Structure formats: C-alpha cells, structure tokens
Amino acid sequence: MDDACFSNLFGKERGTKMIRVLMCGPQADSGGVANHTKSLIKEFSSLEVSLIFYNFSKGNSSNLNWGYAKKTYRRTIGLLFEAILRKDKYDLIHVQTSGGLSSFLSSITGSFASKIVNKKLVITFHHSNTEEFVDKYKHIFKFVLRFSDRMILVSEKQKKYISNVFPEYSSKLVVIPNGYDADFYYPRDIDDCRIKLDLPHDKKIIYNISNLIEVKGHKYLIKAMKSIVQERNDVLCVIVGKGYLVDQLESQIEVEGLQDYVKLVGWKPDDEVPIFMNACDFFVHASLKEGNPTVMFECLGCGKPYVGTRVGGVPEIITHKDYGLLVEPGNPQDLAEKIMDALNKNWNKTKIISYSAQFTWENISRQTLDVYNKIS
C-alpha cells in the first residue's frame, strides 16, 4: 500500500455485508472537519466497514503557497488518480468537505471520479455559512448534488436552506450532527483536573478552546469578561488555542486590565483538552459562524453546560436551558449577561450527561453506516 496517499485500512466482518469505502478528508492537528473525519475512521474500525483513507492534508509545506498548491493537487488531480487506481478496492466514495471553494473542489473531483469508476458517492458538507456559499456557487453546488447519491449535512438549518434552493434533490439530503469521543470526553473529578493543570480551586473557571481567528469571536468574549469582573472577581477565563490573533488578543487583555481574569494558554495536546474541559465550570463559545461545533458535544459529554452563540446548528442541540444558554453573535453585552446567568445557575450535571449520550461518535458512525447501507 502506498502510505504517501493512504492509511488506516481495516474492517471486521460480523456476518453482514462488508462495505468498502474510500474516505477522503483532512487529518490535520485541529479543525472540526479533521476531527470529524478522524473520529469516523476510529469508530468504523469496529463496524462492517473496510476503509481506505485518502488524506487531503498529507504533504503540507512550511511554504504557504507551496502548501496550498499541494492541497489543491490532492483535492483534484491526486484524488482523481487515486480513485481510479484503487477502484477495485472500494465500492463507495465518501468526501468530507467544508467551507470555501478550495475545500469544495474535492466534492467536484469526487463527482467526476464516482461516474468514471461507477461507484456510489456520499458528500458530507460542513460549511458554517451554507447560505452564502450555495448562493455564490449555485451551479457548482447543483452539479455536486446531481451526481451525489447522498449529501450528509450537520444541521437541519443547512438541510432546510438547500432543500428550498434545490427541491428536486431534497431526497438526497440527510442530517447527521457532529459528535464526541466518549473514550476521552467523560466526567472527571474537577479538583483532580485543576491540580493537574495548576488551576485555582477558589475561582469559577470559564473555558474556551478554538483557533485564535476572527470568526471565533474572542474579542467579544474578552469584552464580556470586562463586564463580568466589575461585578465579581472570583472568575477566570481560560482560552486554549493558537492563531494569527494571539498578539492582538493579548494586547486587548492588557488594555482592559484583565491579566488576572483571562489567560491565553496556547495550543494543547489532545490528551490535555478533556482535562481542561473537566476543570471548568462551563464552556463559552463566542463564535460568529459555526456549522455544528464538535466542541459543543465534547462539552456536554463531560457534563458541562454550553454557553454559545445562536449560530448554525447550535440551537438544534442546545434546545433547553438545562443544557446551556444561547447568545446573539457579536453581542458582548448579551454574552456577559448569559455568562453571569451561568455563573449563578445550579446546573444538573447528570441531566446533561444523559442528554449527551445520543451524540457519541459510536452513534454518529452507525447513522453514517446506515446511509451507506441504503445506497449500496
């Protein structure tokens, strides 16, 4: 096997038809689509799936232009060649794609490849701004829909909009939300977690993890914290992540005099992230756009309430105030009020954990397998 292009070939026969899948997606260190793809790969190892994985992220370069060229190649010519060369090893192509035309290129390539090799095609579309993308690339999107056997979406909001624009293809649309890995994201002792991370025991800890980029809305979270500390000083907001805004956000924290209340702790390895989640009192997400953020499910899996913006599929998951609170995006005053409400609320951890069970990757992978079975 050529490990420059493929990895993770596995499967277990359980007396049912083995489905052979060419899974195409990123496997970067961070990012929702990469986490989704890796999580499905892990869960498929125990199901009736023989999986060949084609990595869009393979061969990245420190040179941004060259790295972008490699990604484009792997999503177009590279994917097409490999789909043809490996055609006898799989029955179905599944492409994971997100926002931006550069990512959606893989769906276009998958459409051509599926017809050339006469294989079924499943597309998972993760884009956080579906309406804008579909409007801008309507003809391209219709082309992919036409040649797909199923398109998996992560929210009902996505499905409703796409069905309105392309009613003739509405029967191809399936909603399967993101999920969380119950082997990592489960309730742990809050005091033990704070000891491991050297976090204070006498403060309410607010946690956020996301790339430090504009769309994640960190500046609004910092503004909200300015209002919070004027009313109480027993709070600490811990932000995990890396990105181009790190210096700007550090400066904002200093200007607002929040050095003792907001900490940017940088990127952390995967095995530390669940410890941070369990060390907090609740999670806050100030993002301006989302599809269906994986971190929301990870938060619930740890029994922590989710305070987040009313974007994408979030309102479809945070359906009751027992699980979290919803905020208008880009509104630091509303965010401050909801954070204050969360600080003062007695949350029912058991109820949150029970609700989260439906979103484990084990359940999500079985729903995806069901899609495969229906078109095979």
Image (spheres, grey):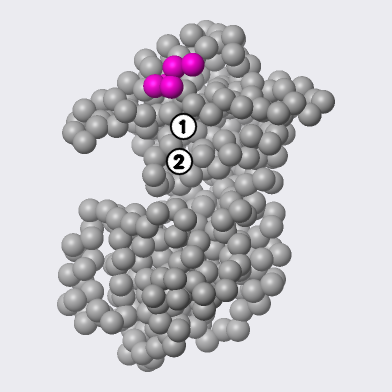
Expressed as whole percent of the image width and height from the top left, the position of residue 80 reads 43, 14
Q: Which of 313 and 230 is in front in this view?
A: 230
Residue type at numbered disc 1: Gly
Snapshot quadrant of residue 184: bottom right
Work out how far the residue at label 1 is from the one at label 2, CA to CA, in angstroms.
7 Å
Could you say where residue 294 lies in the image, as x and y percent from the top left?
51, 52
Q: Which residues fall within the magenta stretch?
A: 1-5
**Identity, as a three-letter code, of the amino acid under mark 2:** Ala
- Can residue 149 be spotted in the picture? no
Q: In which quarter of the image is residue 121?
A: top right
Closer to us: 237 or 76: 237
- Does 222 sit above or below residue 71? below
219 left or right of 88?
Answer: left
Number of marks drawn: 2
Residue that badge 1 annotates: 25
Name the dominant secondary structure of the magenta segment: loop
Q: Is residue 89 left or right of residue 334?
A: right
User: Magenta stretch containing residue 211, yes or no?
Assistant: no
Mark 2 burial class by Cα count in 10 Å: few <14, some 14-19, many 20+ = many
Q: Residue at x 64, y 34 (%)?
A: 45
Q: Name the residue carrying label 2.
A: 34
Locate residue 57, reporting x and y percent: 37, 32
- Binning the other alpha carbons within 10 Å of mark 1 as few (below 14), some (14 to 19) or many (20 upward) gives many
Q: Work out which quarter of the rendered image holds the C terminus and state it.
A: top right
Q: Where is residue 162 in the image (x, y as percent from the top left)?
A: 54, 38
As drawn, 130 above or below 18: below
Q: Earlier in the sequence, mark 1 or mark 2?
A: 1
Q: Is mark 1 on a helix, strand or loop?
A: strand
Residue occupying image coordinates x 17% and y 70%: 251
- Provide the secondary structure element on which disc 2 rests: helix
Kindly identify the residue that appears in the image at 23 percent across and 53 percent down. Answer: 244
At 65% from the left edge and 68% from the top edge, which residue is drawn? 352
